[in-house]
Image (cartoon, helix red, strand yellow):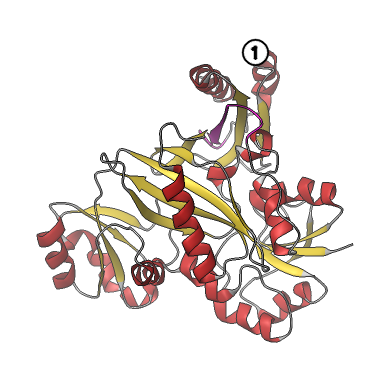
């Protein structure tokens, strides 16, 4: 039985388990704590910054992959030197870990992206504001996610604290043009070592407080061919192995600009669990083991995903489950077994069908019951 090891015990590792069972694989999880979302699959508890612990976990696995992108790449390089298959490899993963590395590579490839620059000083920030302001986006190159490590600023003083500890961010901040976009899109794809590449239906993502709230697939009236070719260019040039998400801005003129990358299953692809012939989790496992990729087409005209974000430190949604299930039997429920906390990703709802408006209304109303609103 092939063994896939997943570093990180979050909900993505949790949702790989059913796919692994169906494929006849053994899934092992290196979790950070005993009460992680993937606790049922966790075979090791430890520190992913400790090489000896990582190696002890990985040595018997046919491939190592990730629930998150925080493992230092130099440790992953050591695993590769020890003959362990790391997928995606550190040379690809660094582009998802460091946004400045990503921006430089996209520029080298000639792919569309917002105007950007690296900043080491307040003077650098002010110069970029003068050219692209009055407001710009400033990001920490490493460590940010779900809106963390991102600020909209009109003055360098608004990032003085980041500039004061700039060495902790690799010595530079990332400055980006504040794009006047009409909507956000996400192109998921998968590539395996032999080179086979497939995309999922292009999805539209709807954000709330910088966190994904809803996903619609396929994105209505979008440039599917352009999104697919952007994803292909990135995956092939970086030799990405596994699922990759390319987050995109669509301008009012219909132009696509690359926002960020993720090299693992992604929140924007959860619709595929019930909406596609092959889910992103199954596809990821196929890819990292270099197995033939599955059919990614939709089973229905539309698939909708509604994120369940924590409302407070008490509501884990379980008390309202029966009522929500009774009112919306067509909804597929996915909870992550996490302790409740405001804004935390606690689960999601999937809906499929032919009437997009009806799916969105049903999903939002079901979520309102779980939120006790």
Rendered position, 216 above or below 262: above
Tell me which residue sits at (76%, 73%) in the image. 58
Which residue lies under the disc numbered 1? Answer: 327
Helix, strand or loop status at disc 1? helix
Q: Report if residue 37 is visible in the image.
A: no
Check the image and name the residue furthest to the bottom. 81
Picture residue at 75% right of the left edge, 52% below the top: 39
Residue 4 counted in the magenta span: no
In the visual, does 43 lie left or right of 50?
Answer: right
Farthest residue, direction left: 130
Instruction: Return the residue found at the far right.
Output: 1
Count of picture labels: 1
Q: Compared with residue 245, is residue 209 higher up or lower down, i.e. above or below?
A: above
Percent across and percent down for residue 198 are 61, 52
Measuring from the top left, give residue 274's x and y in whole percent: 68, 34
Foreground residue, 145 or 185? 185
* Residue 162, x across and y down, in percent: 29, 67
Give the residue at x 22% y 66%: 160
Q: Quadrant of residue 336?
A: top right
Quadrant of residue 8 in the image?
A: bottom right
Q: Name the side, left or right, on which 115 lies relative to 229.
A: left
State whether residue 335 appears in this view: yes
Residue 82: x percent and y percent? 72, 85
When the figure is inspected, residue 329 is found, relative to residue 26, above or below; the finding is: above
Q: Quadrant of the N terminus?
A: bottom right
Asked if the stretch drawn in magenta spans residue 299, the answer is yes
The answer to which of 320 and 204 lies nearer the viewer is: 204
The structure residue drawn at horizontal position 46% and vertical position 43%, both measured from the top left corner, is: 224
The magenta span reads 298-313
């Amino acid at each position: 039985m092939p063994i896939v090891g997943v570093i990180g015990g979050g909900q993505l590792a949790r949702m790989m388990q059913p796919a692994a069972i169906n494929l006849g694989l053994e899934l092992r999880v290196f979790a950070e704590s005993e009460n992680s979302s993937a606790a049922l699959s966790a075979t090791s508890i430890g520190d992913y910054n400790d090489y000896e612990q990582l190696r002890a976990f990985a040595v018997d696995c046919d491939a190592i992959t990730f629930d998150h992108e925080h493992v230092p790449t130099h440790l992953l390089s050591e695993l590769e030197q020890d003959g362990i298959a790391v997928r995606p490899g550190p040379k690809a993963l660094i582009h998802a870990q460091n946004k400045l590395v990503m921006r430089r590579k996209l520029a080298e490839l000639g792919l569309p992206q917002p105007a950007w620059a690296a900043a080491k000083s307040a003077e650098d920030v002010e110069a970029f504001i003068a050219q692209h302001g009055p407001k710009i986006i400033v990001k920490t190159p490493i460590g940010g996610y779900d809106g963390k490590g991102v600020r909209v600023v009109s003055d360098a003083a608004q990032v003085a604290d980041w500039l004061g500890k700039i060495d902790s961010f690799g010595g530079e901040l990332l400055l980006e043009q504040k794009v006047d976009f009409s909507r956000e899109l996400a192109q998921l794809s998968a590539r395996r070592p032999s080179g086979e590449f497939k995309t999922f239906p292009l999805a539209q993502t709807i954000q709330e407080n910088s966190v994904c709230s809803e996903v619609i697939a396929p994105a209505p009236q979008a440039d599917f061919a352009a999104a697919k070719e952007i994803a292909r260019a990135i995956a092939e040039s970086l030799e990405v192995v596994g699922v990759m998400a390319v987050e995109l801005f669509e301008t009012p003129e219909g132009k696509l600009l690359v926002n960020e990358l993720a090299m693992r299953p992604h929140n924007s692809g959860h619709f595929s669990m019930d909406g596609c012939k092959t889910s992103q989790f199954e596809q990821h496992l196929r890819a990292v083991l270099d197995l033939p990729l599955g059919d990614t087409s939709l089973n229905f005209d539309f698939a909708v995903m509604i994120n369940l974000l924590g409302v407070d430190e008490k509501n884990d949604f379980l008390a309202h489950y029966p009522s929500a299930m009774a009112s919306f039997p067509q909804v597929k429920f996915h909870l992550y077994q996490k302790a409740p906390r405001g804004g935390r990703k606690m689960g999601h709802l999937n809906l499929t069908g032919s009437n997009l408006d009806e799916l969105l209304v049903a999903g939002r109303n079901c979520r309102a019951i779980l939120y006790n609103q």
